[in-house]
Amino acid sequence: MDSILSAEGPVTAVLPADLTAEGEARRFVSRVLSAWRDTLAFEDATLIASELVANVVRHAGGKPTLSITTTARGIRIECEDGNPAPPRPKLGGPEGGWGLALVERLSQRWGVQARDAGKVVWCELPLPPMSGNG
């Protein structure tokens, strides 16, 4: 856990290939952002991480690998899996399908990159504006 205390480079967690991964993803993101003492909206970052991990477990199969790193303007969250098929956004409804729509709405930008035999779905969240008399 010492690597969490540094905002240098990505902090990564390999999560289980089952639905417990969603909760573990939320806890992981909260721990990292708390250690970094960022003023980011934890709720948005933890929700996005949970949705990205859930998509891997439900649709791509295998163990998701979740990474968080700092950028010049905020943070980048990446979720890697071993399935090369790109995610297919769906219209949300009673059966689900809200995941990528939430990622798109809550992040500044997002995308998909091929990596090894699989892919990475990533998004970037901005730092909130400075407030006060700073």
Image: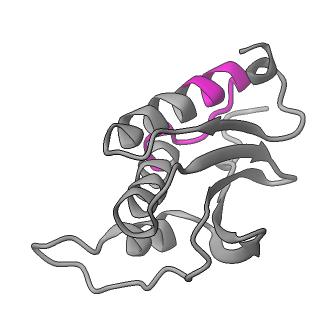
Residue 39 magenta-highlighted: yes
Q: In the current view of this chain or complex, which residue is farthest to the left?
A: 94
Residue 132: quadrant of the picture: top right
Identify the main secondary structure in magenta: helix
Residue 68, position as x, y percentages in the image: 70, 44
Above/below status of 63 relative to 91: above
Q: Residue at x 44, y 85 (%)?
A: 88
Q: How is the image coloured?
A: one colour
Above/below status of 91 relative to 66: below
Residue 104, position as x, y percentages in the image: 50, 73
Above/below status of 92 relative to 18: below
Q: In the current view of this chain or complex, which residue is farthest to the top?
A: 2
Asked whether 53 or 103 is in front, the reply is 53
Q: Residue at x 41, y 63 (%)?
A: 55
The stretch of residues the image draws in magenta is: 31-44
Residue 1, position as x, y percentages in the image: 71, 15
Residue 16, position as x, y percentages in the image: 46, 39
Q: Residue at x 56, y 82 (%)?
A: 86
Q: Residue at x 48, y 66 (%)?
A: 103
Left or right: 98 as drawn, with respect to 131: left
Left or right: 39 as drawn, with respect to 6: left
Above/below status of 4 relative to 124: above
Quadrant housing the C terminus: top right
Asked whether 39 or 86 is in front, the reply is 86
Left or right: 100 as drawn, with respect to 63: left
| Total numbered labels | 0
Residue 32 magenta-highlighted: yes
Asked whether 101 or 21 is in front, the reply is 21
Asked whether 63 or 103 is in front, the reply is 63
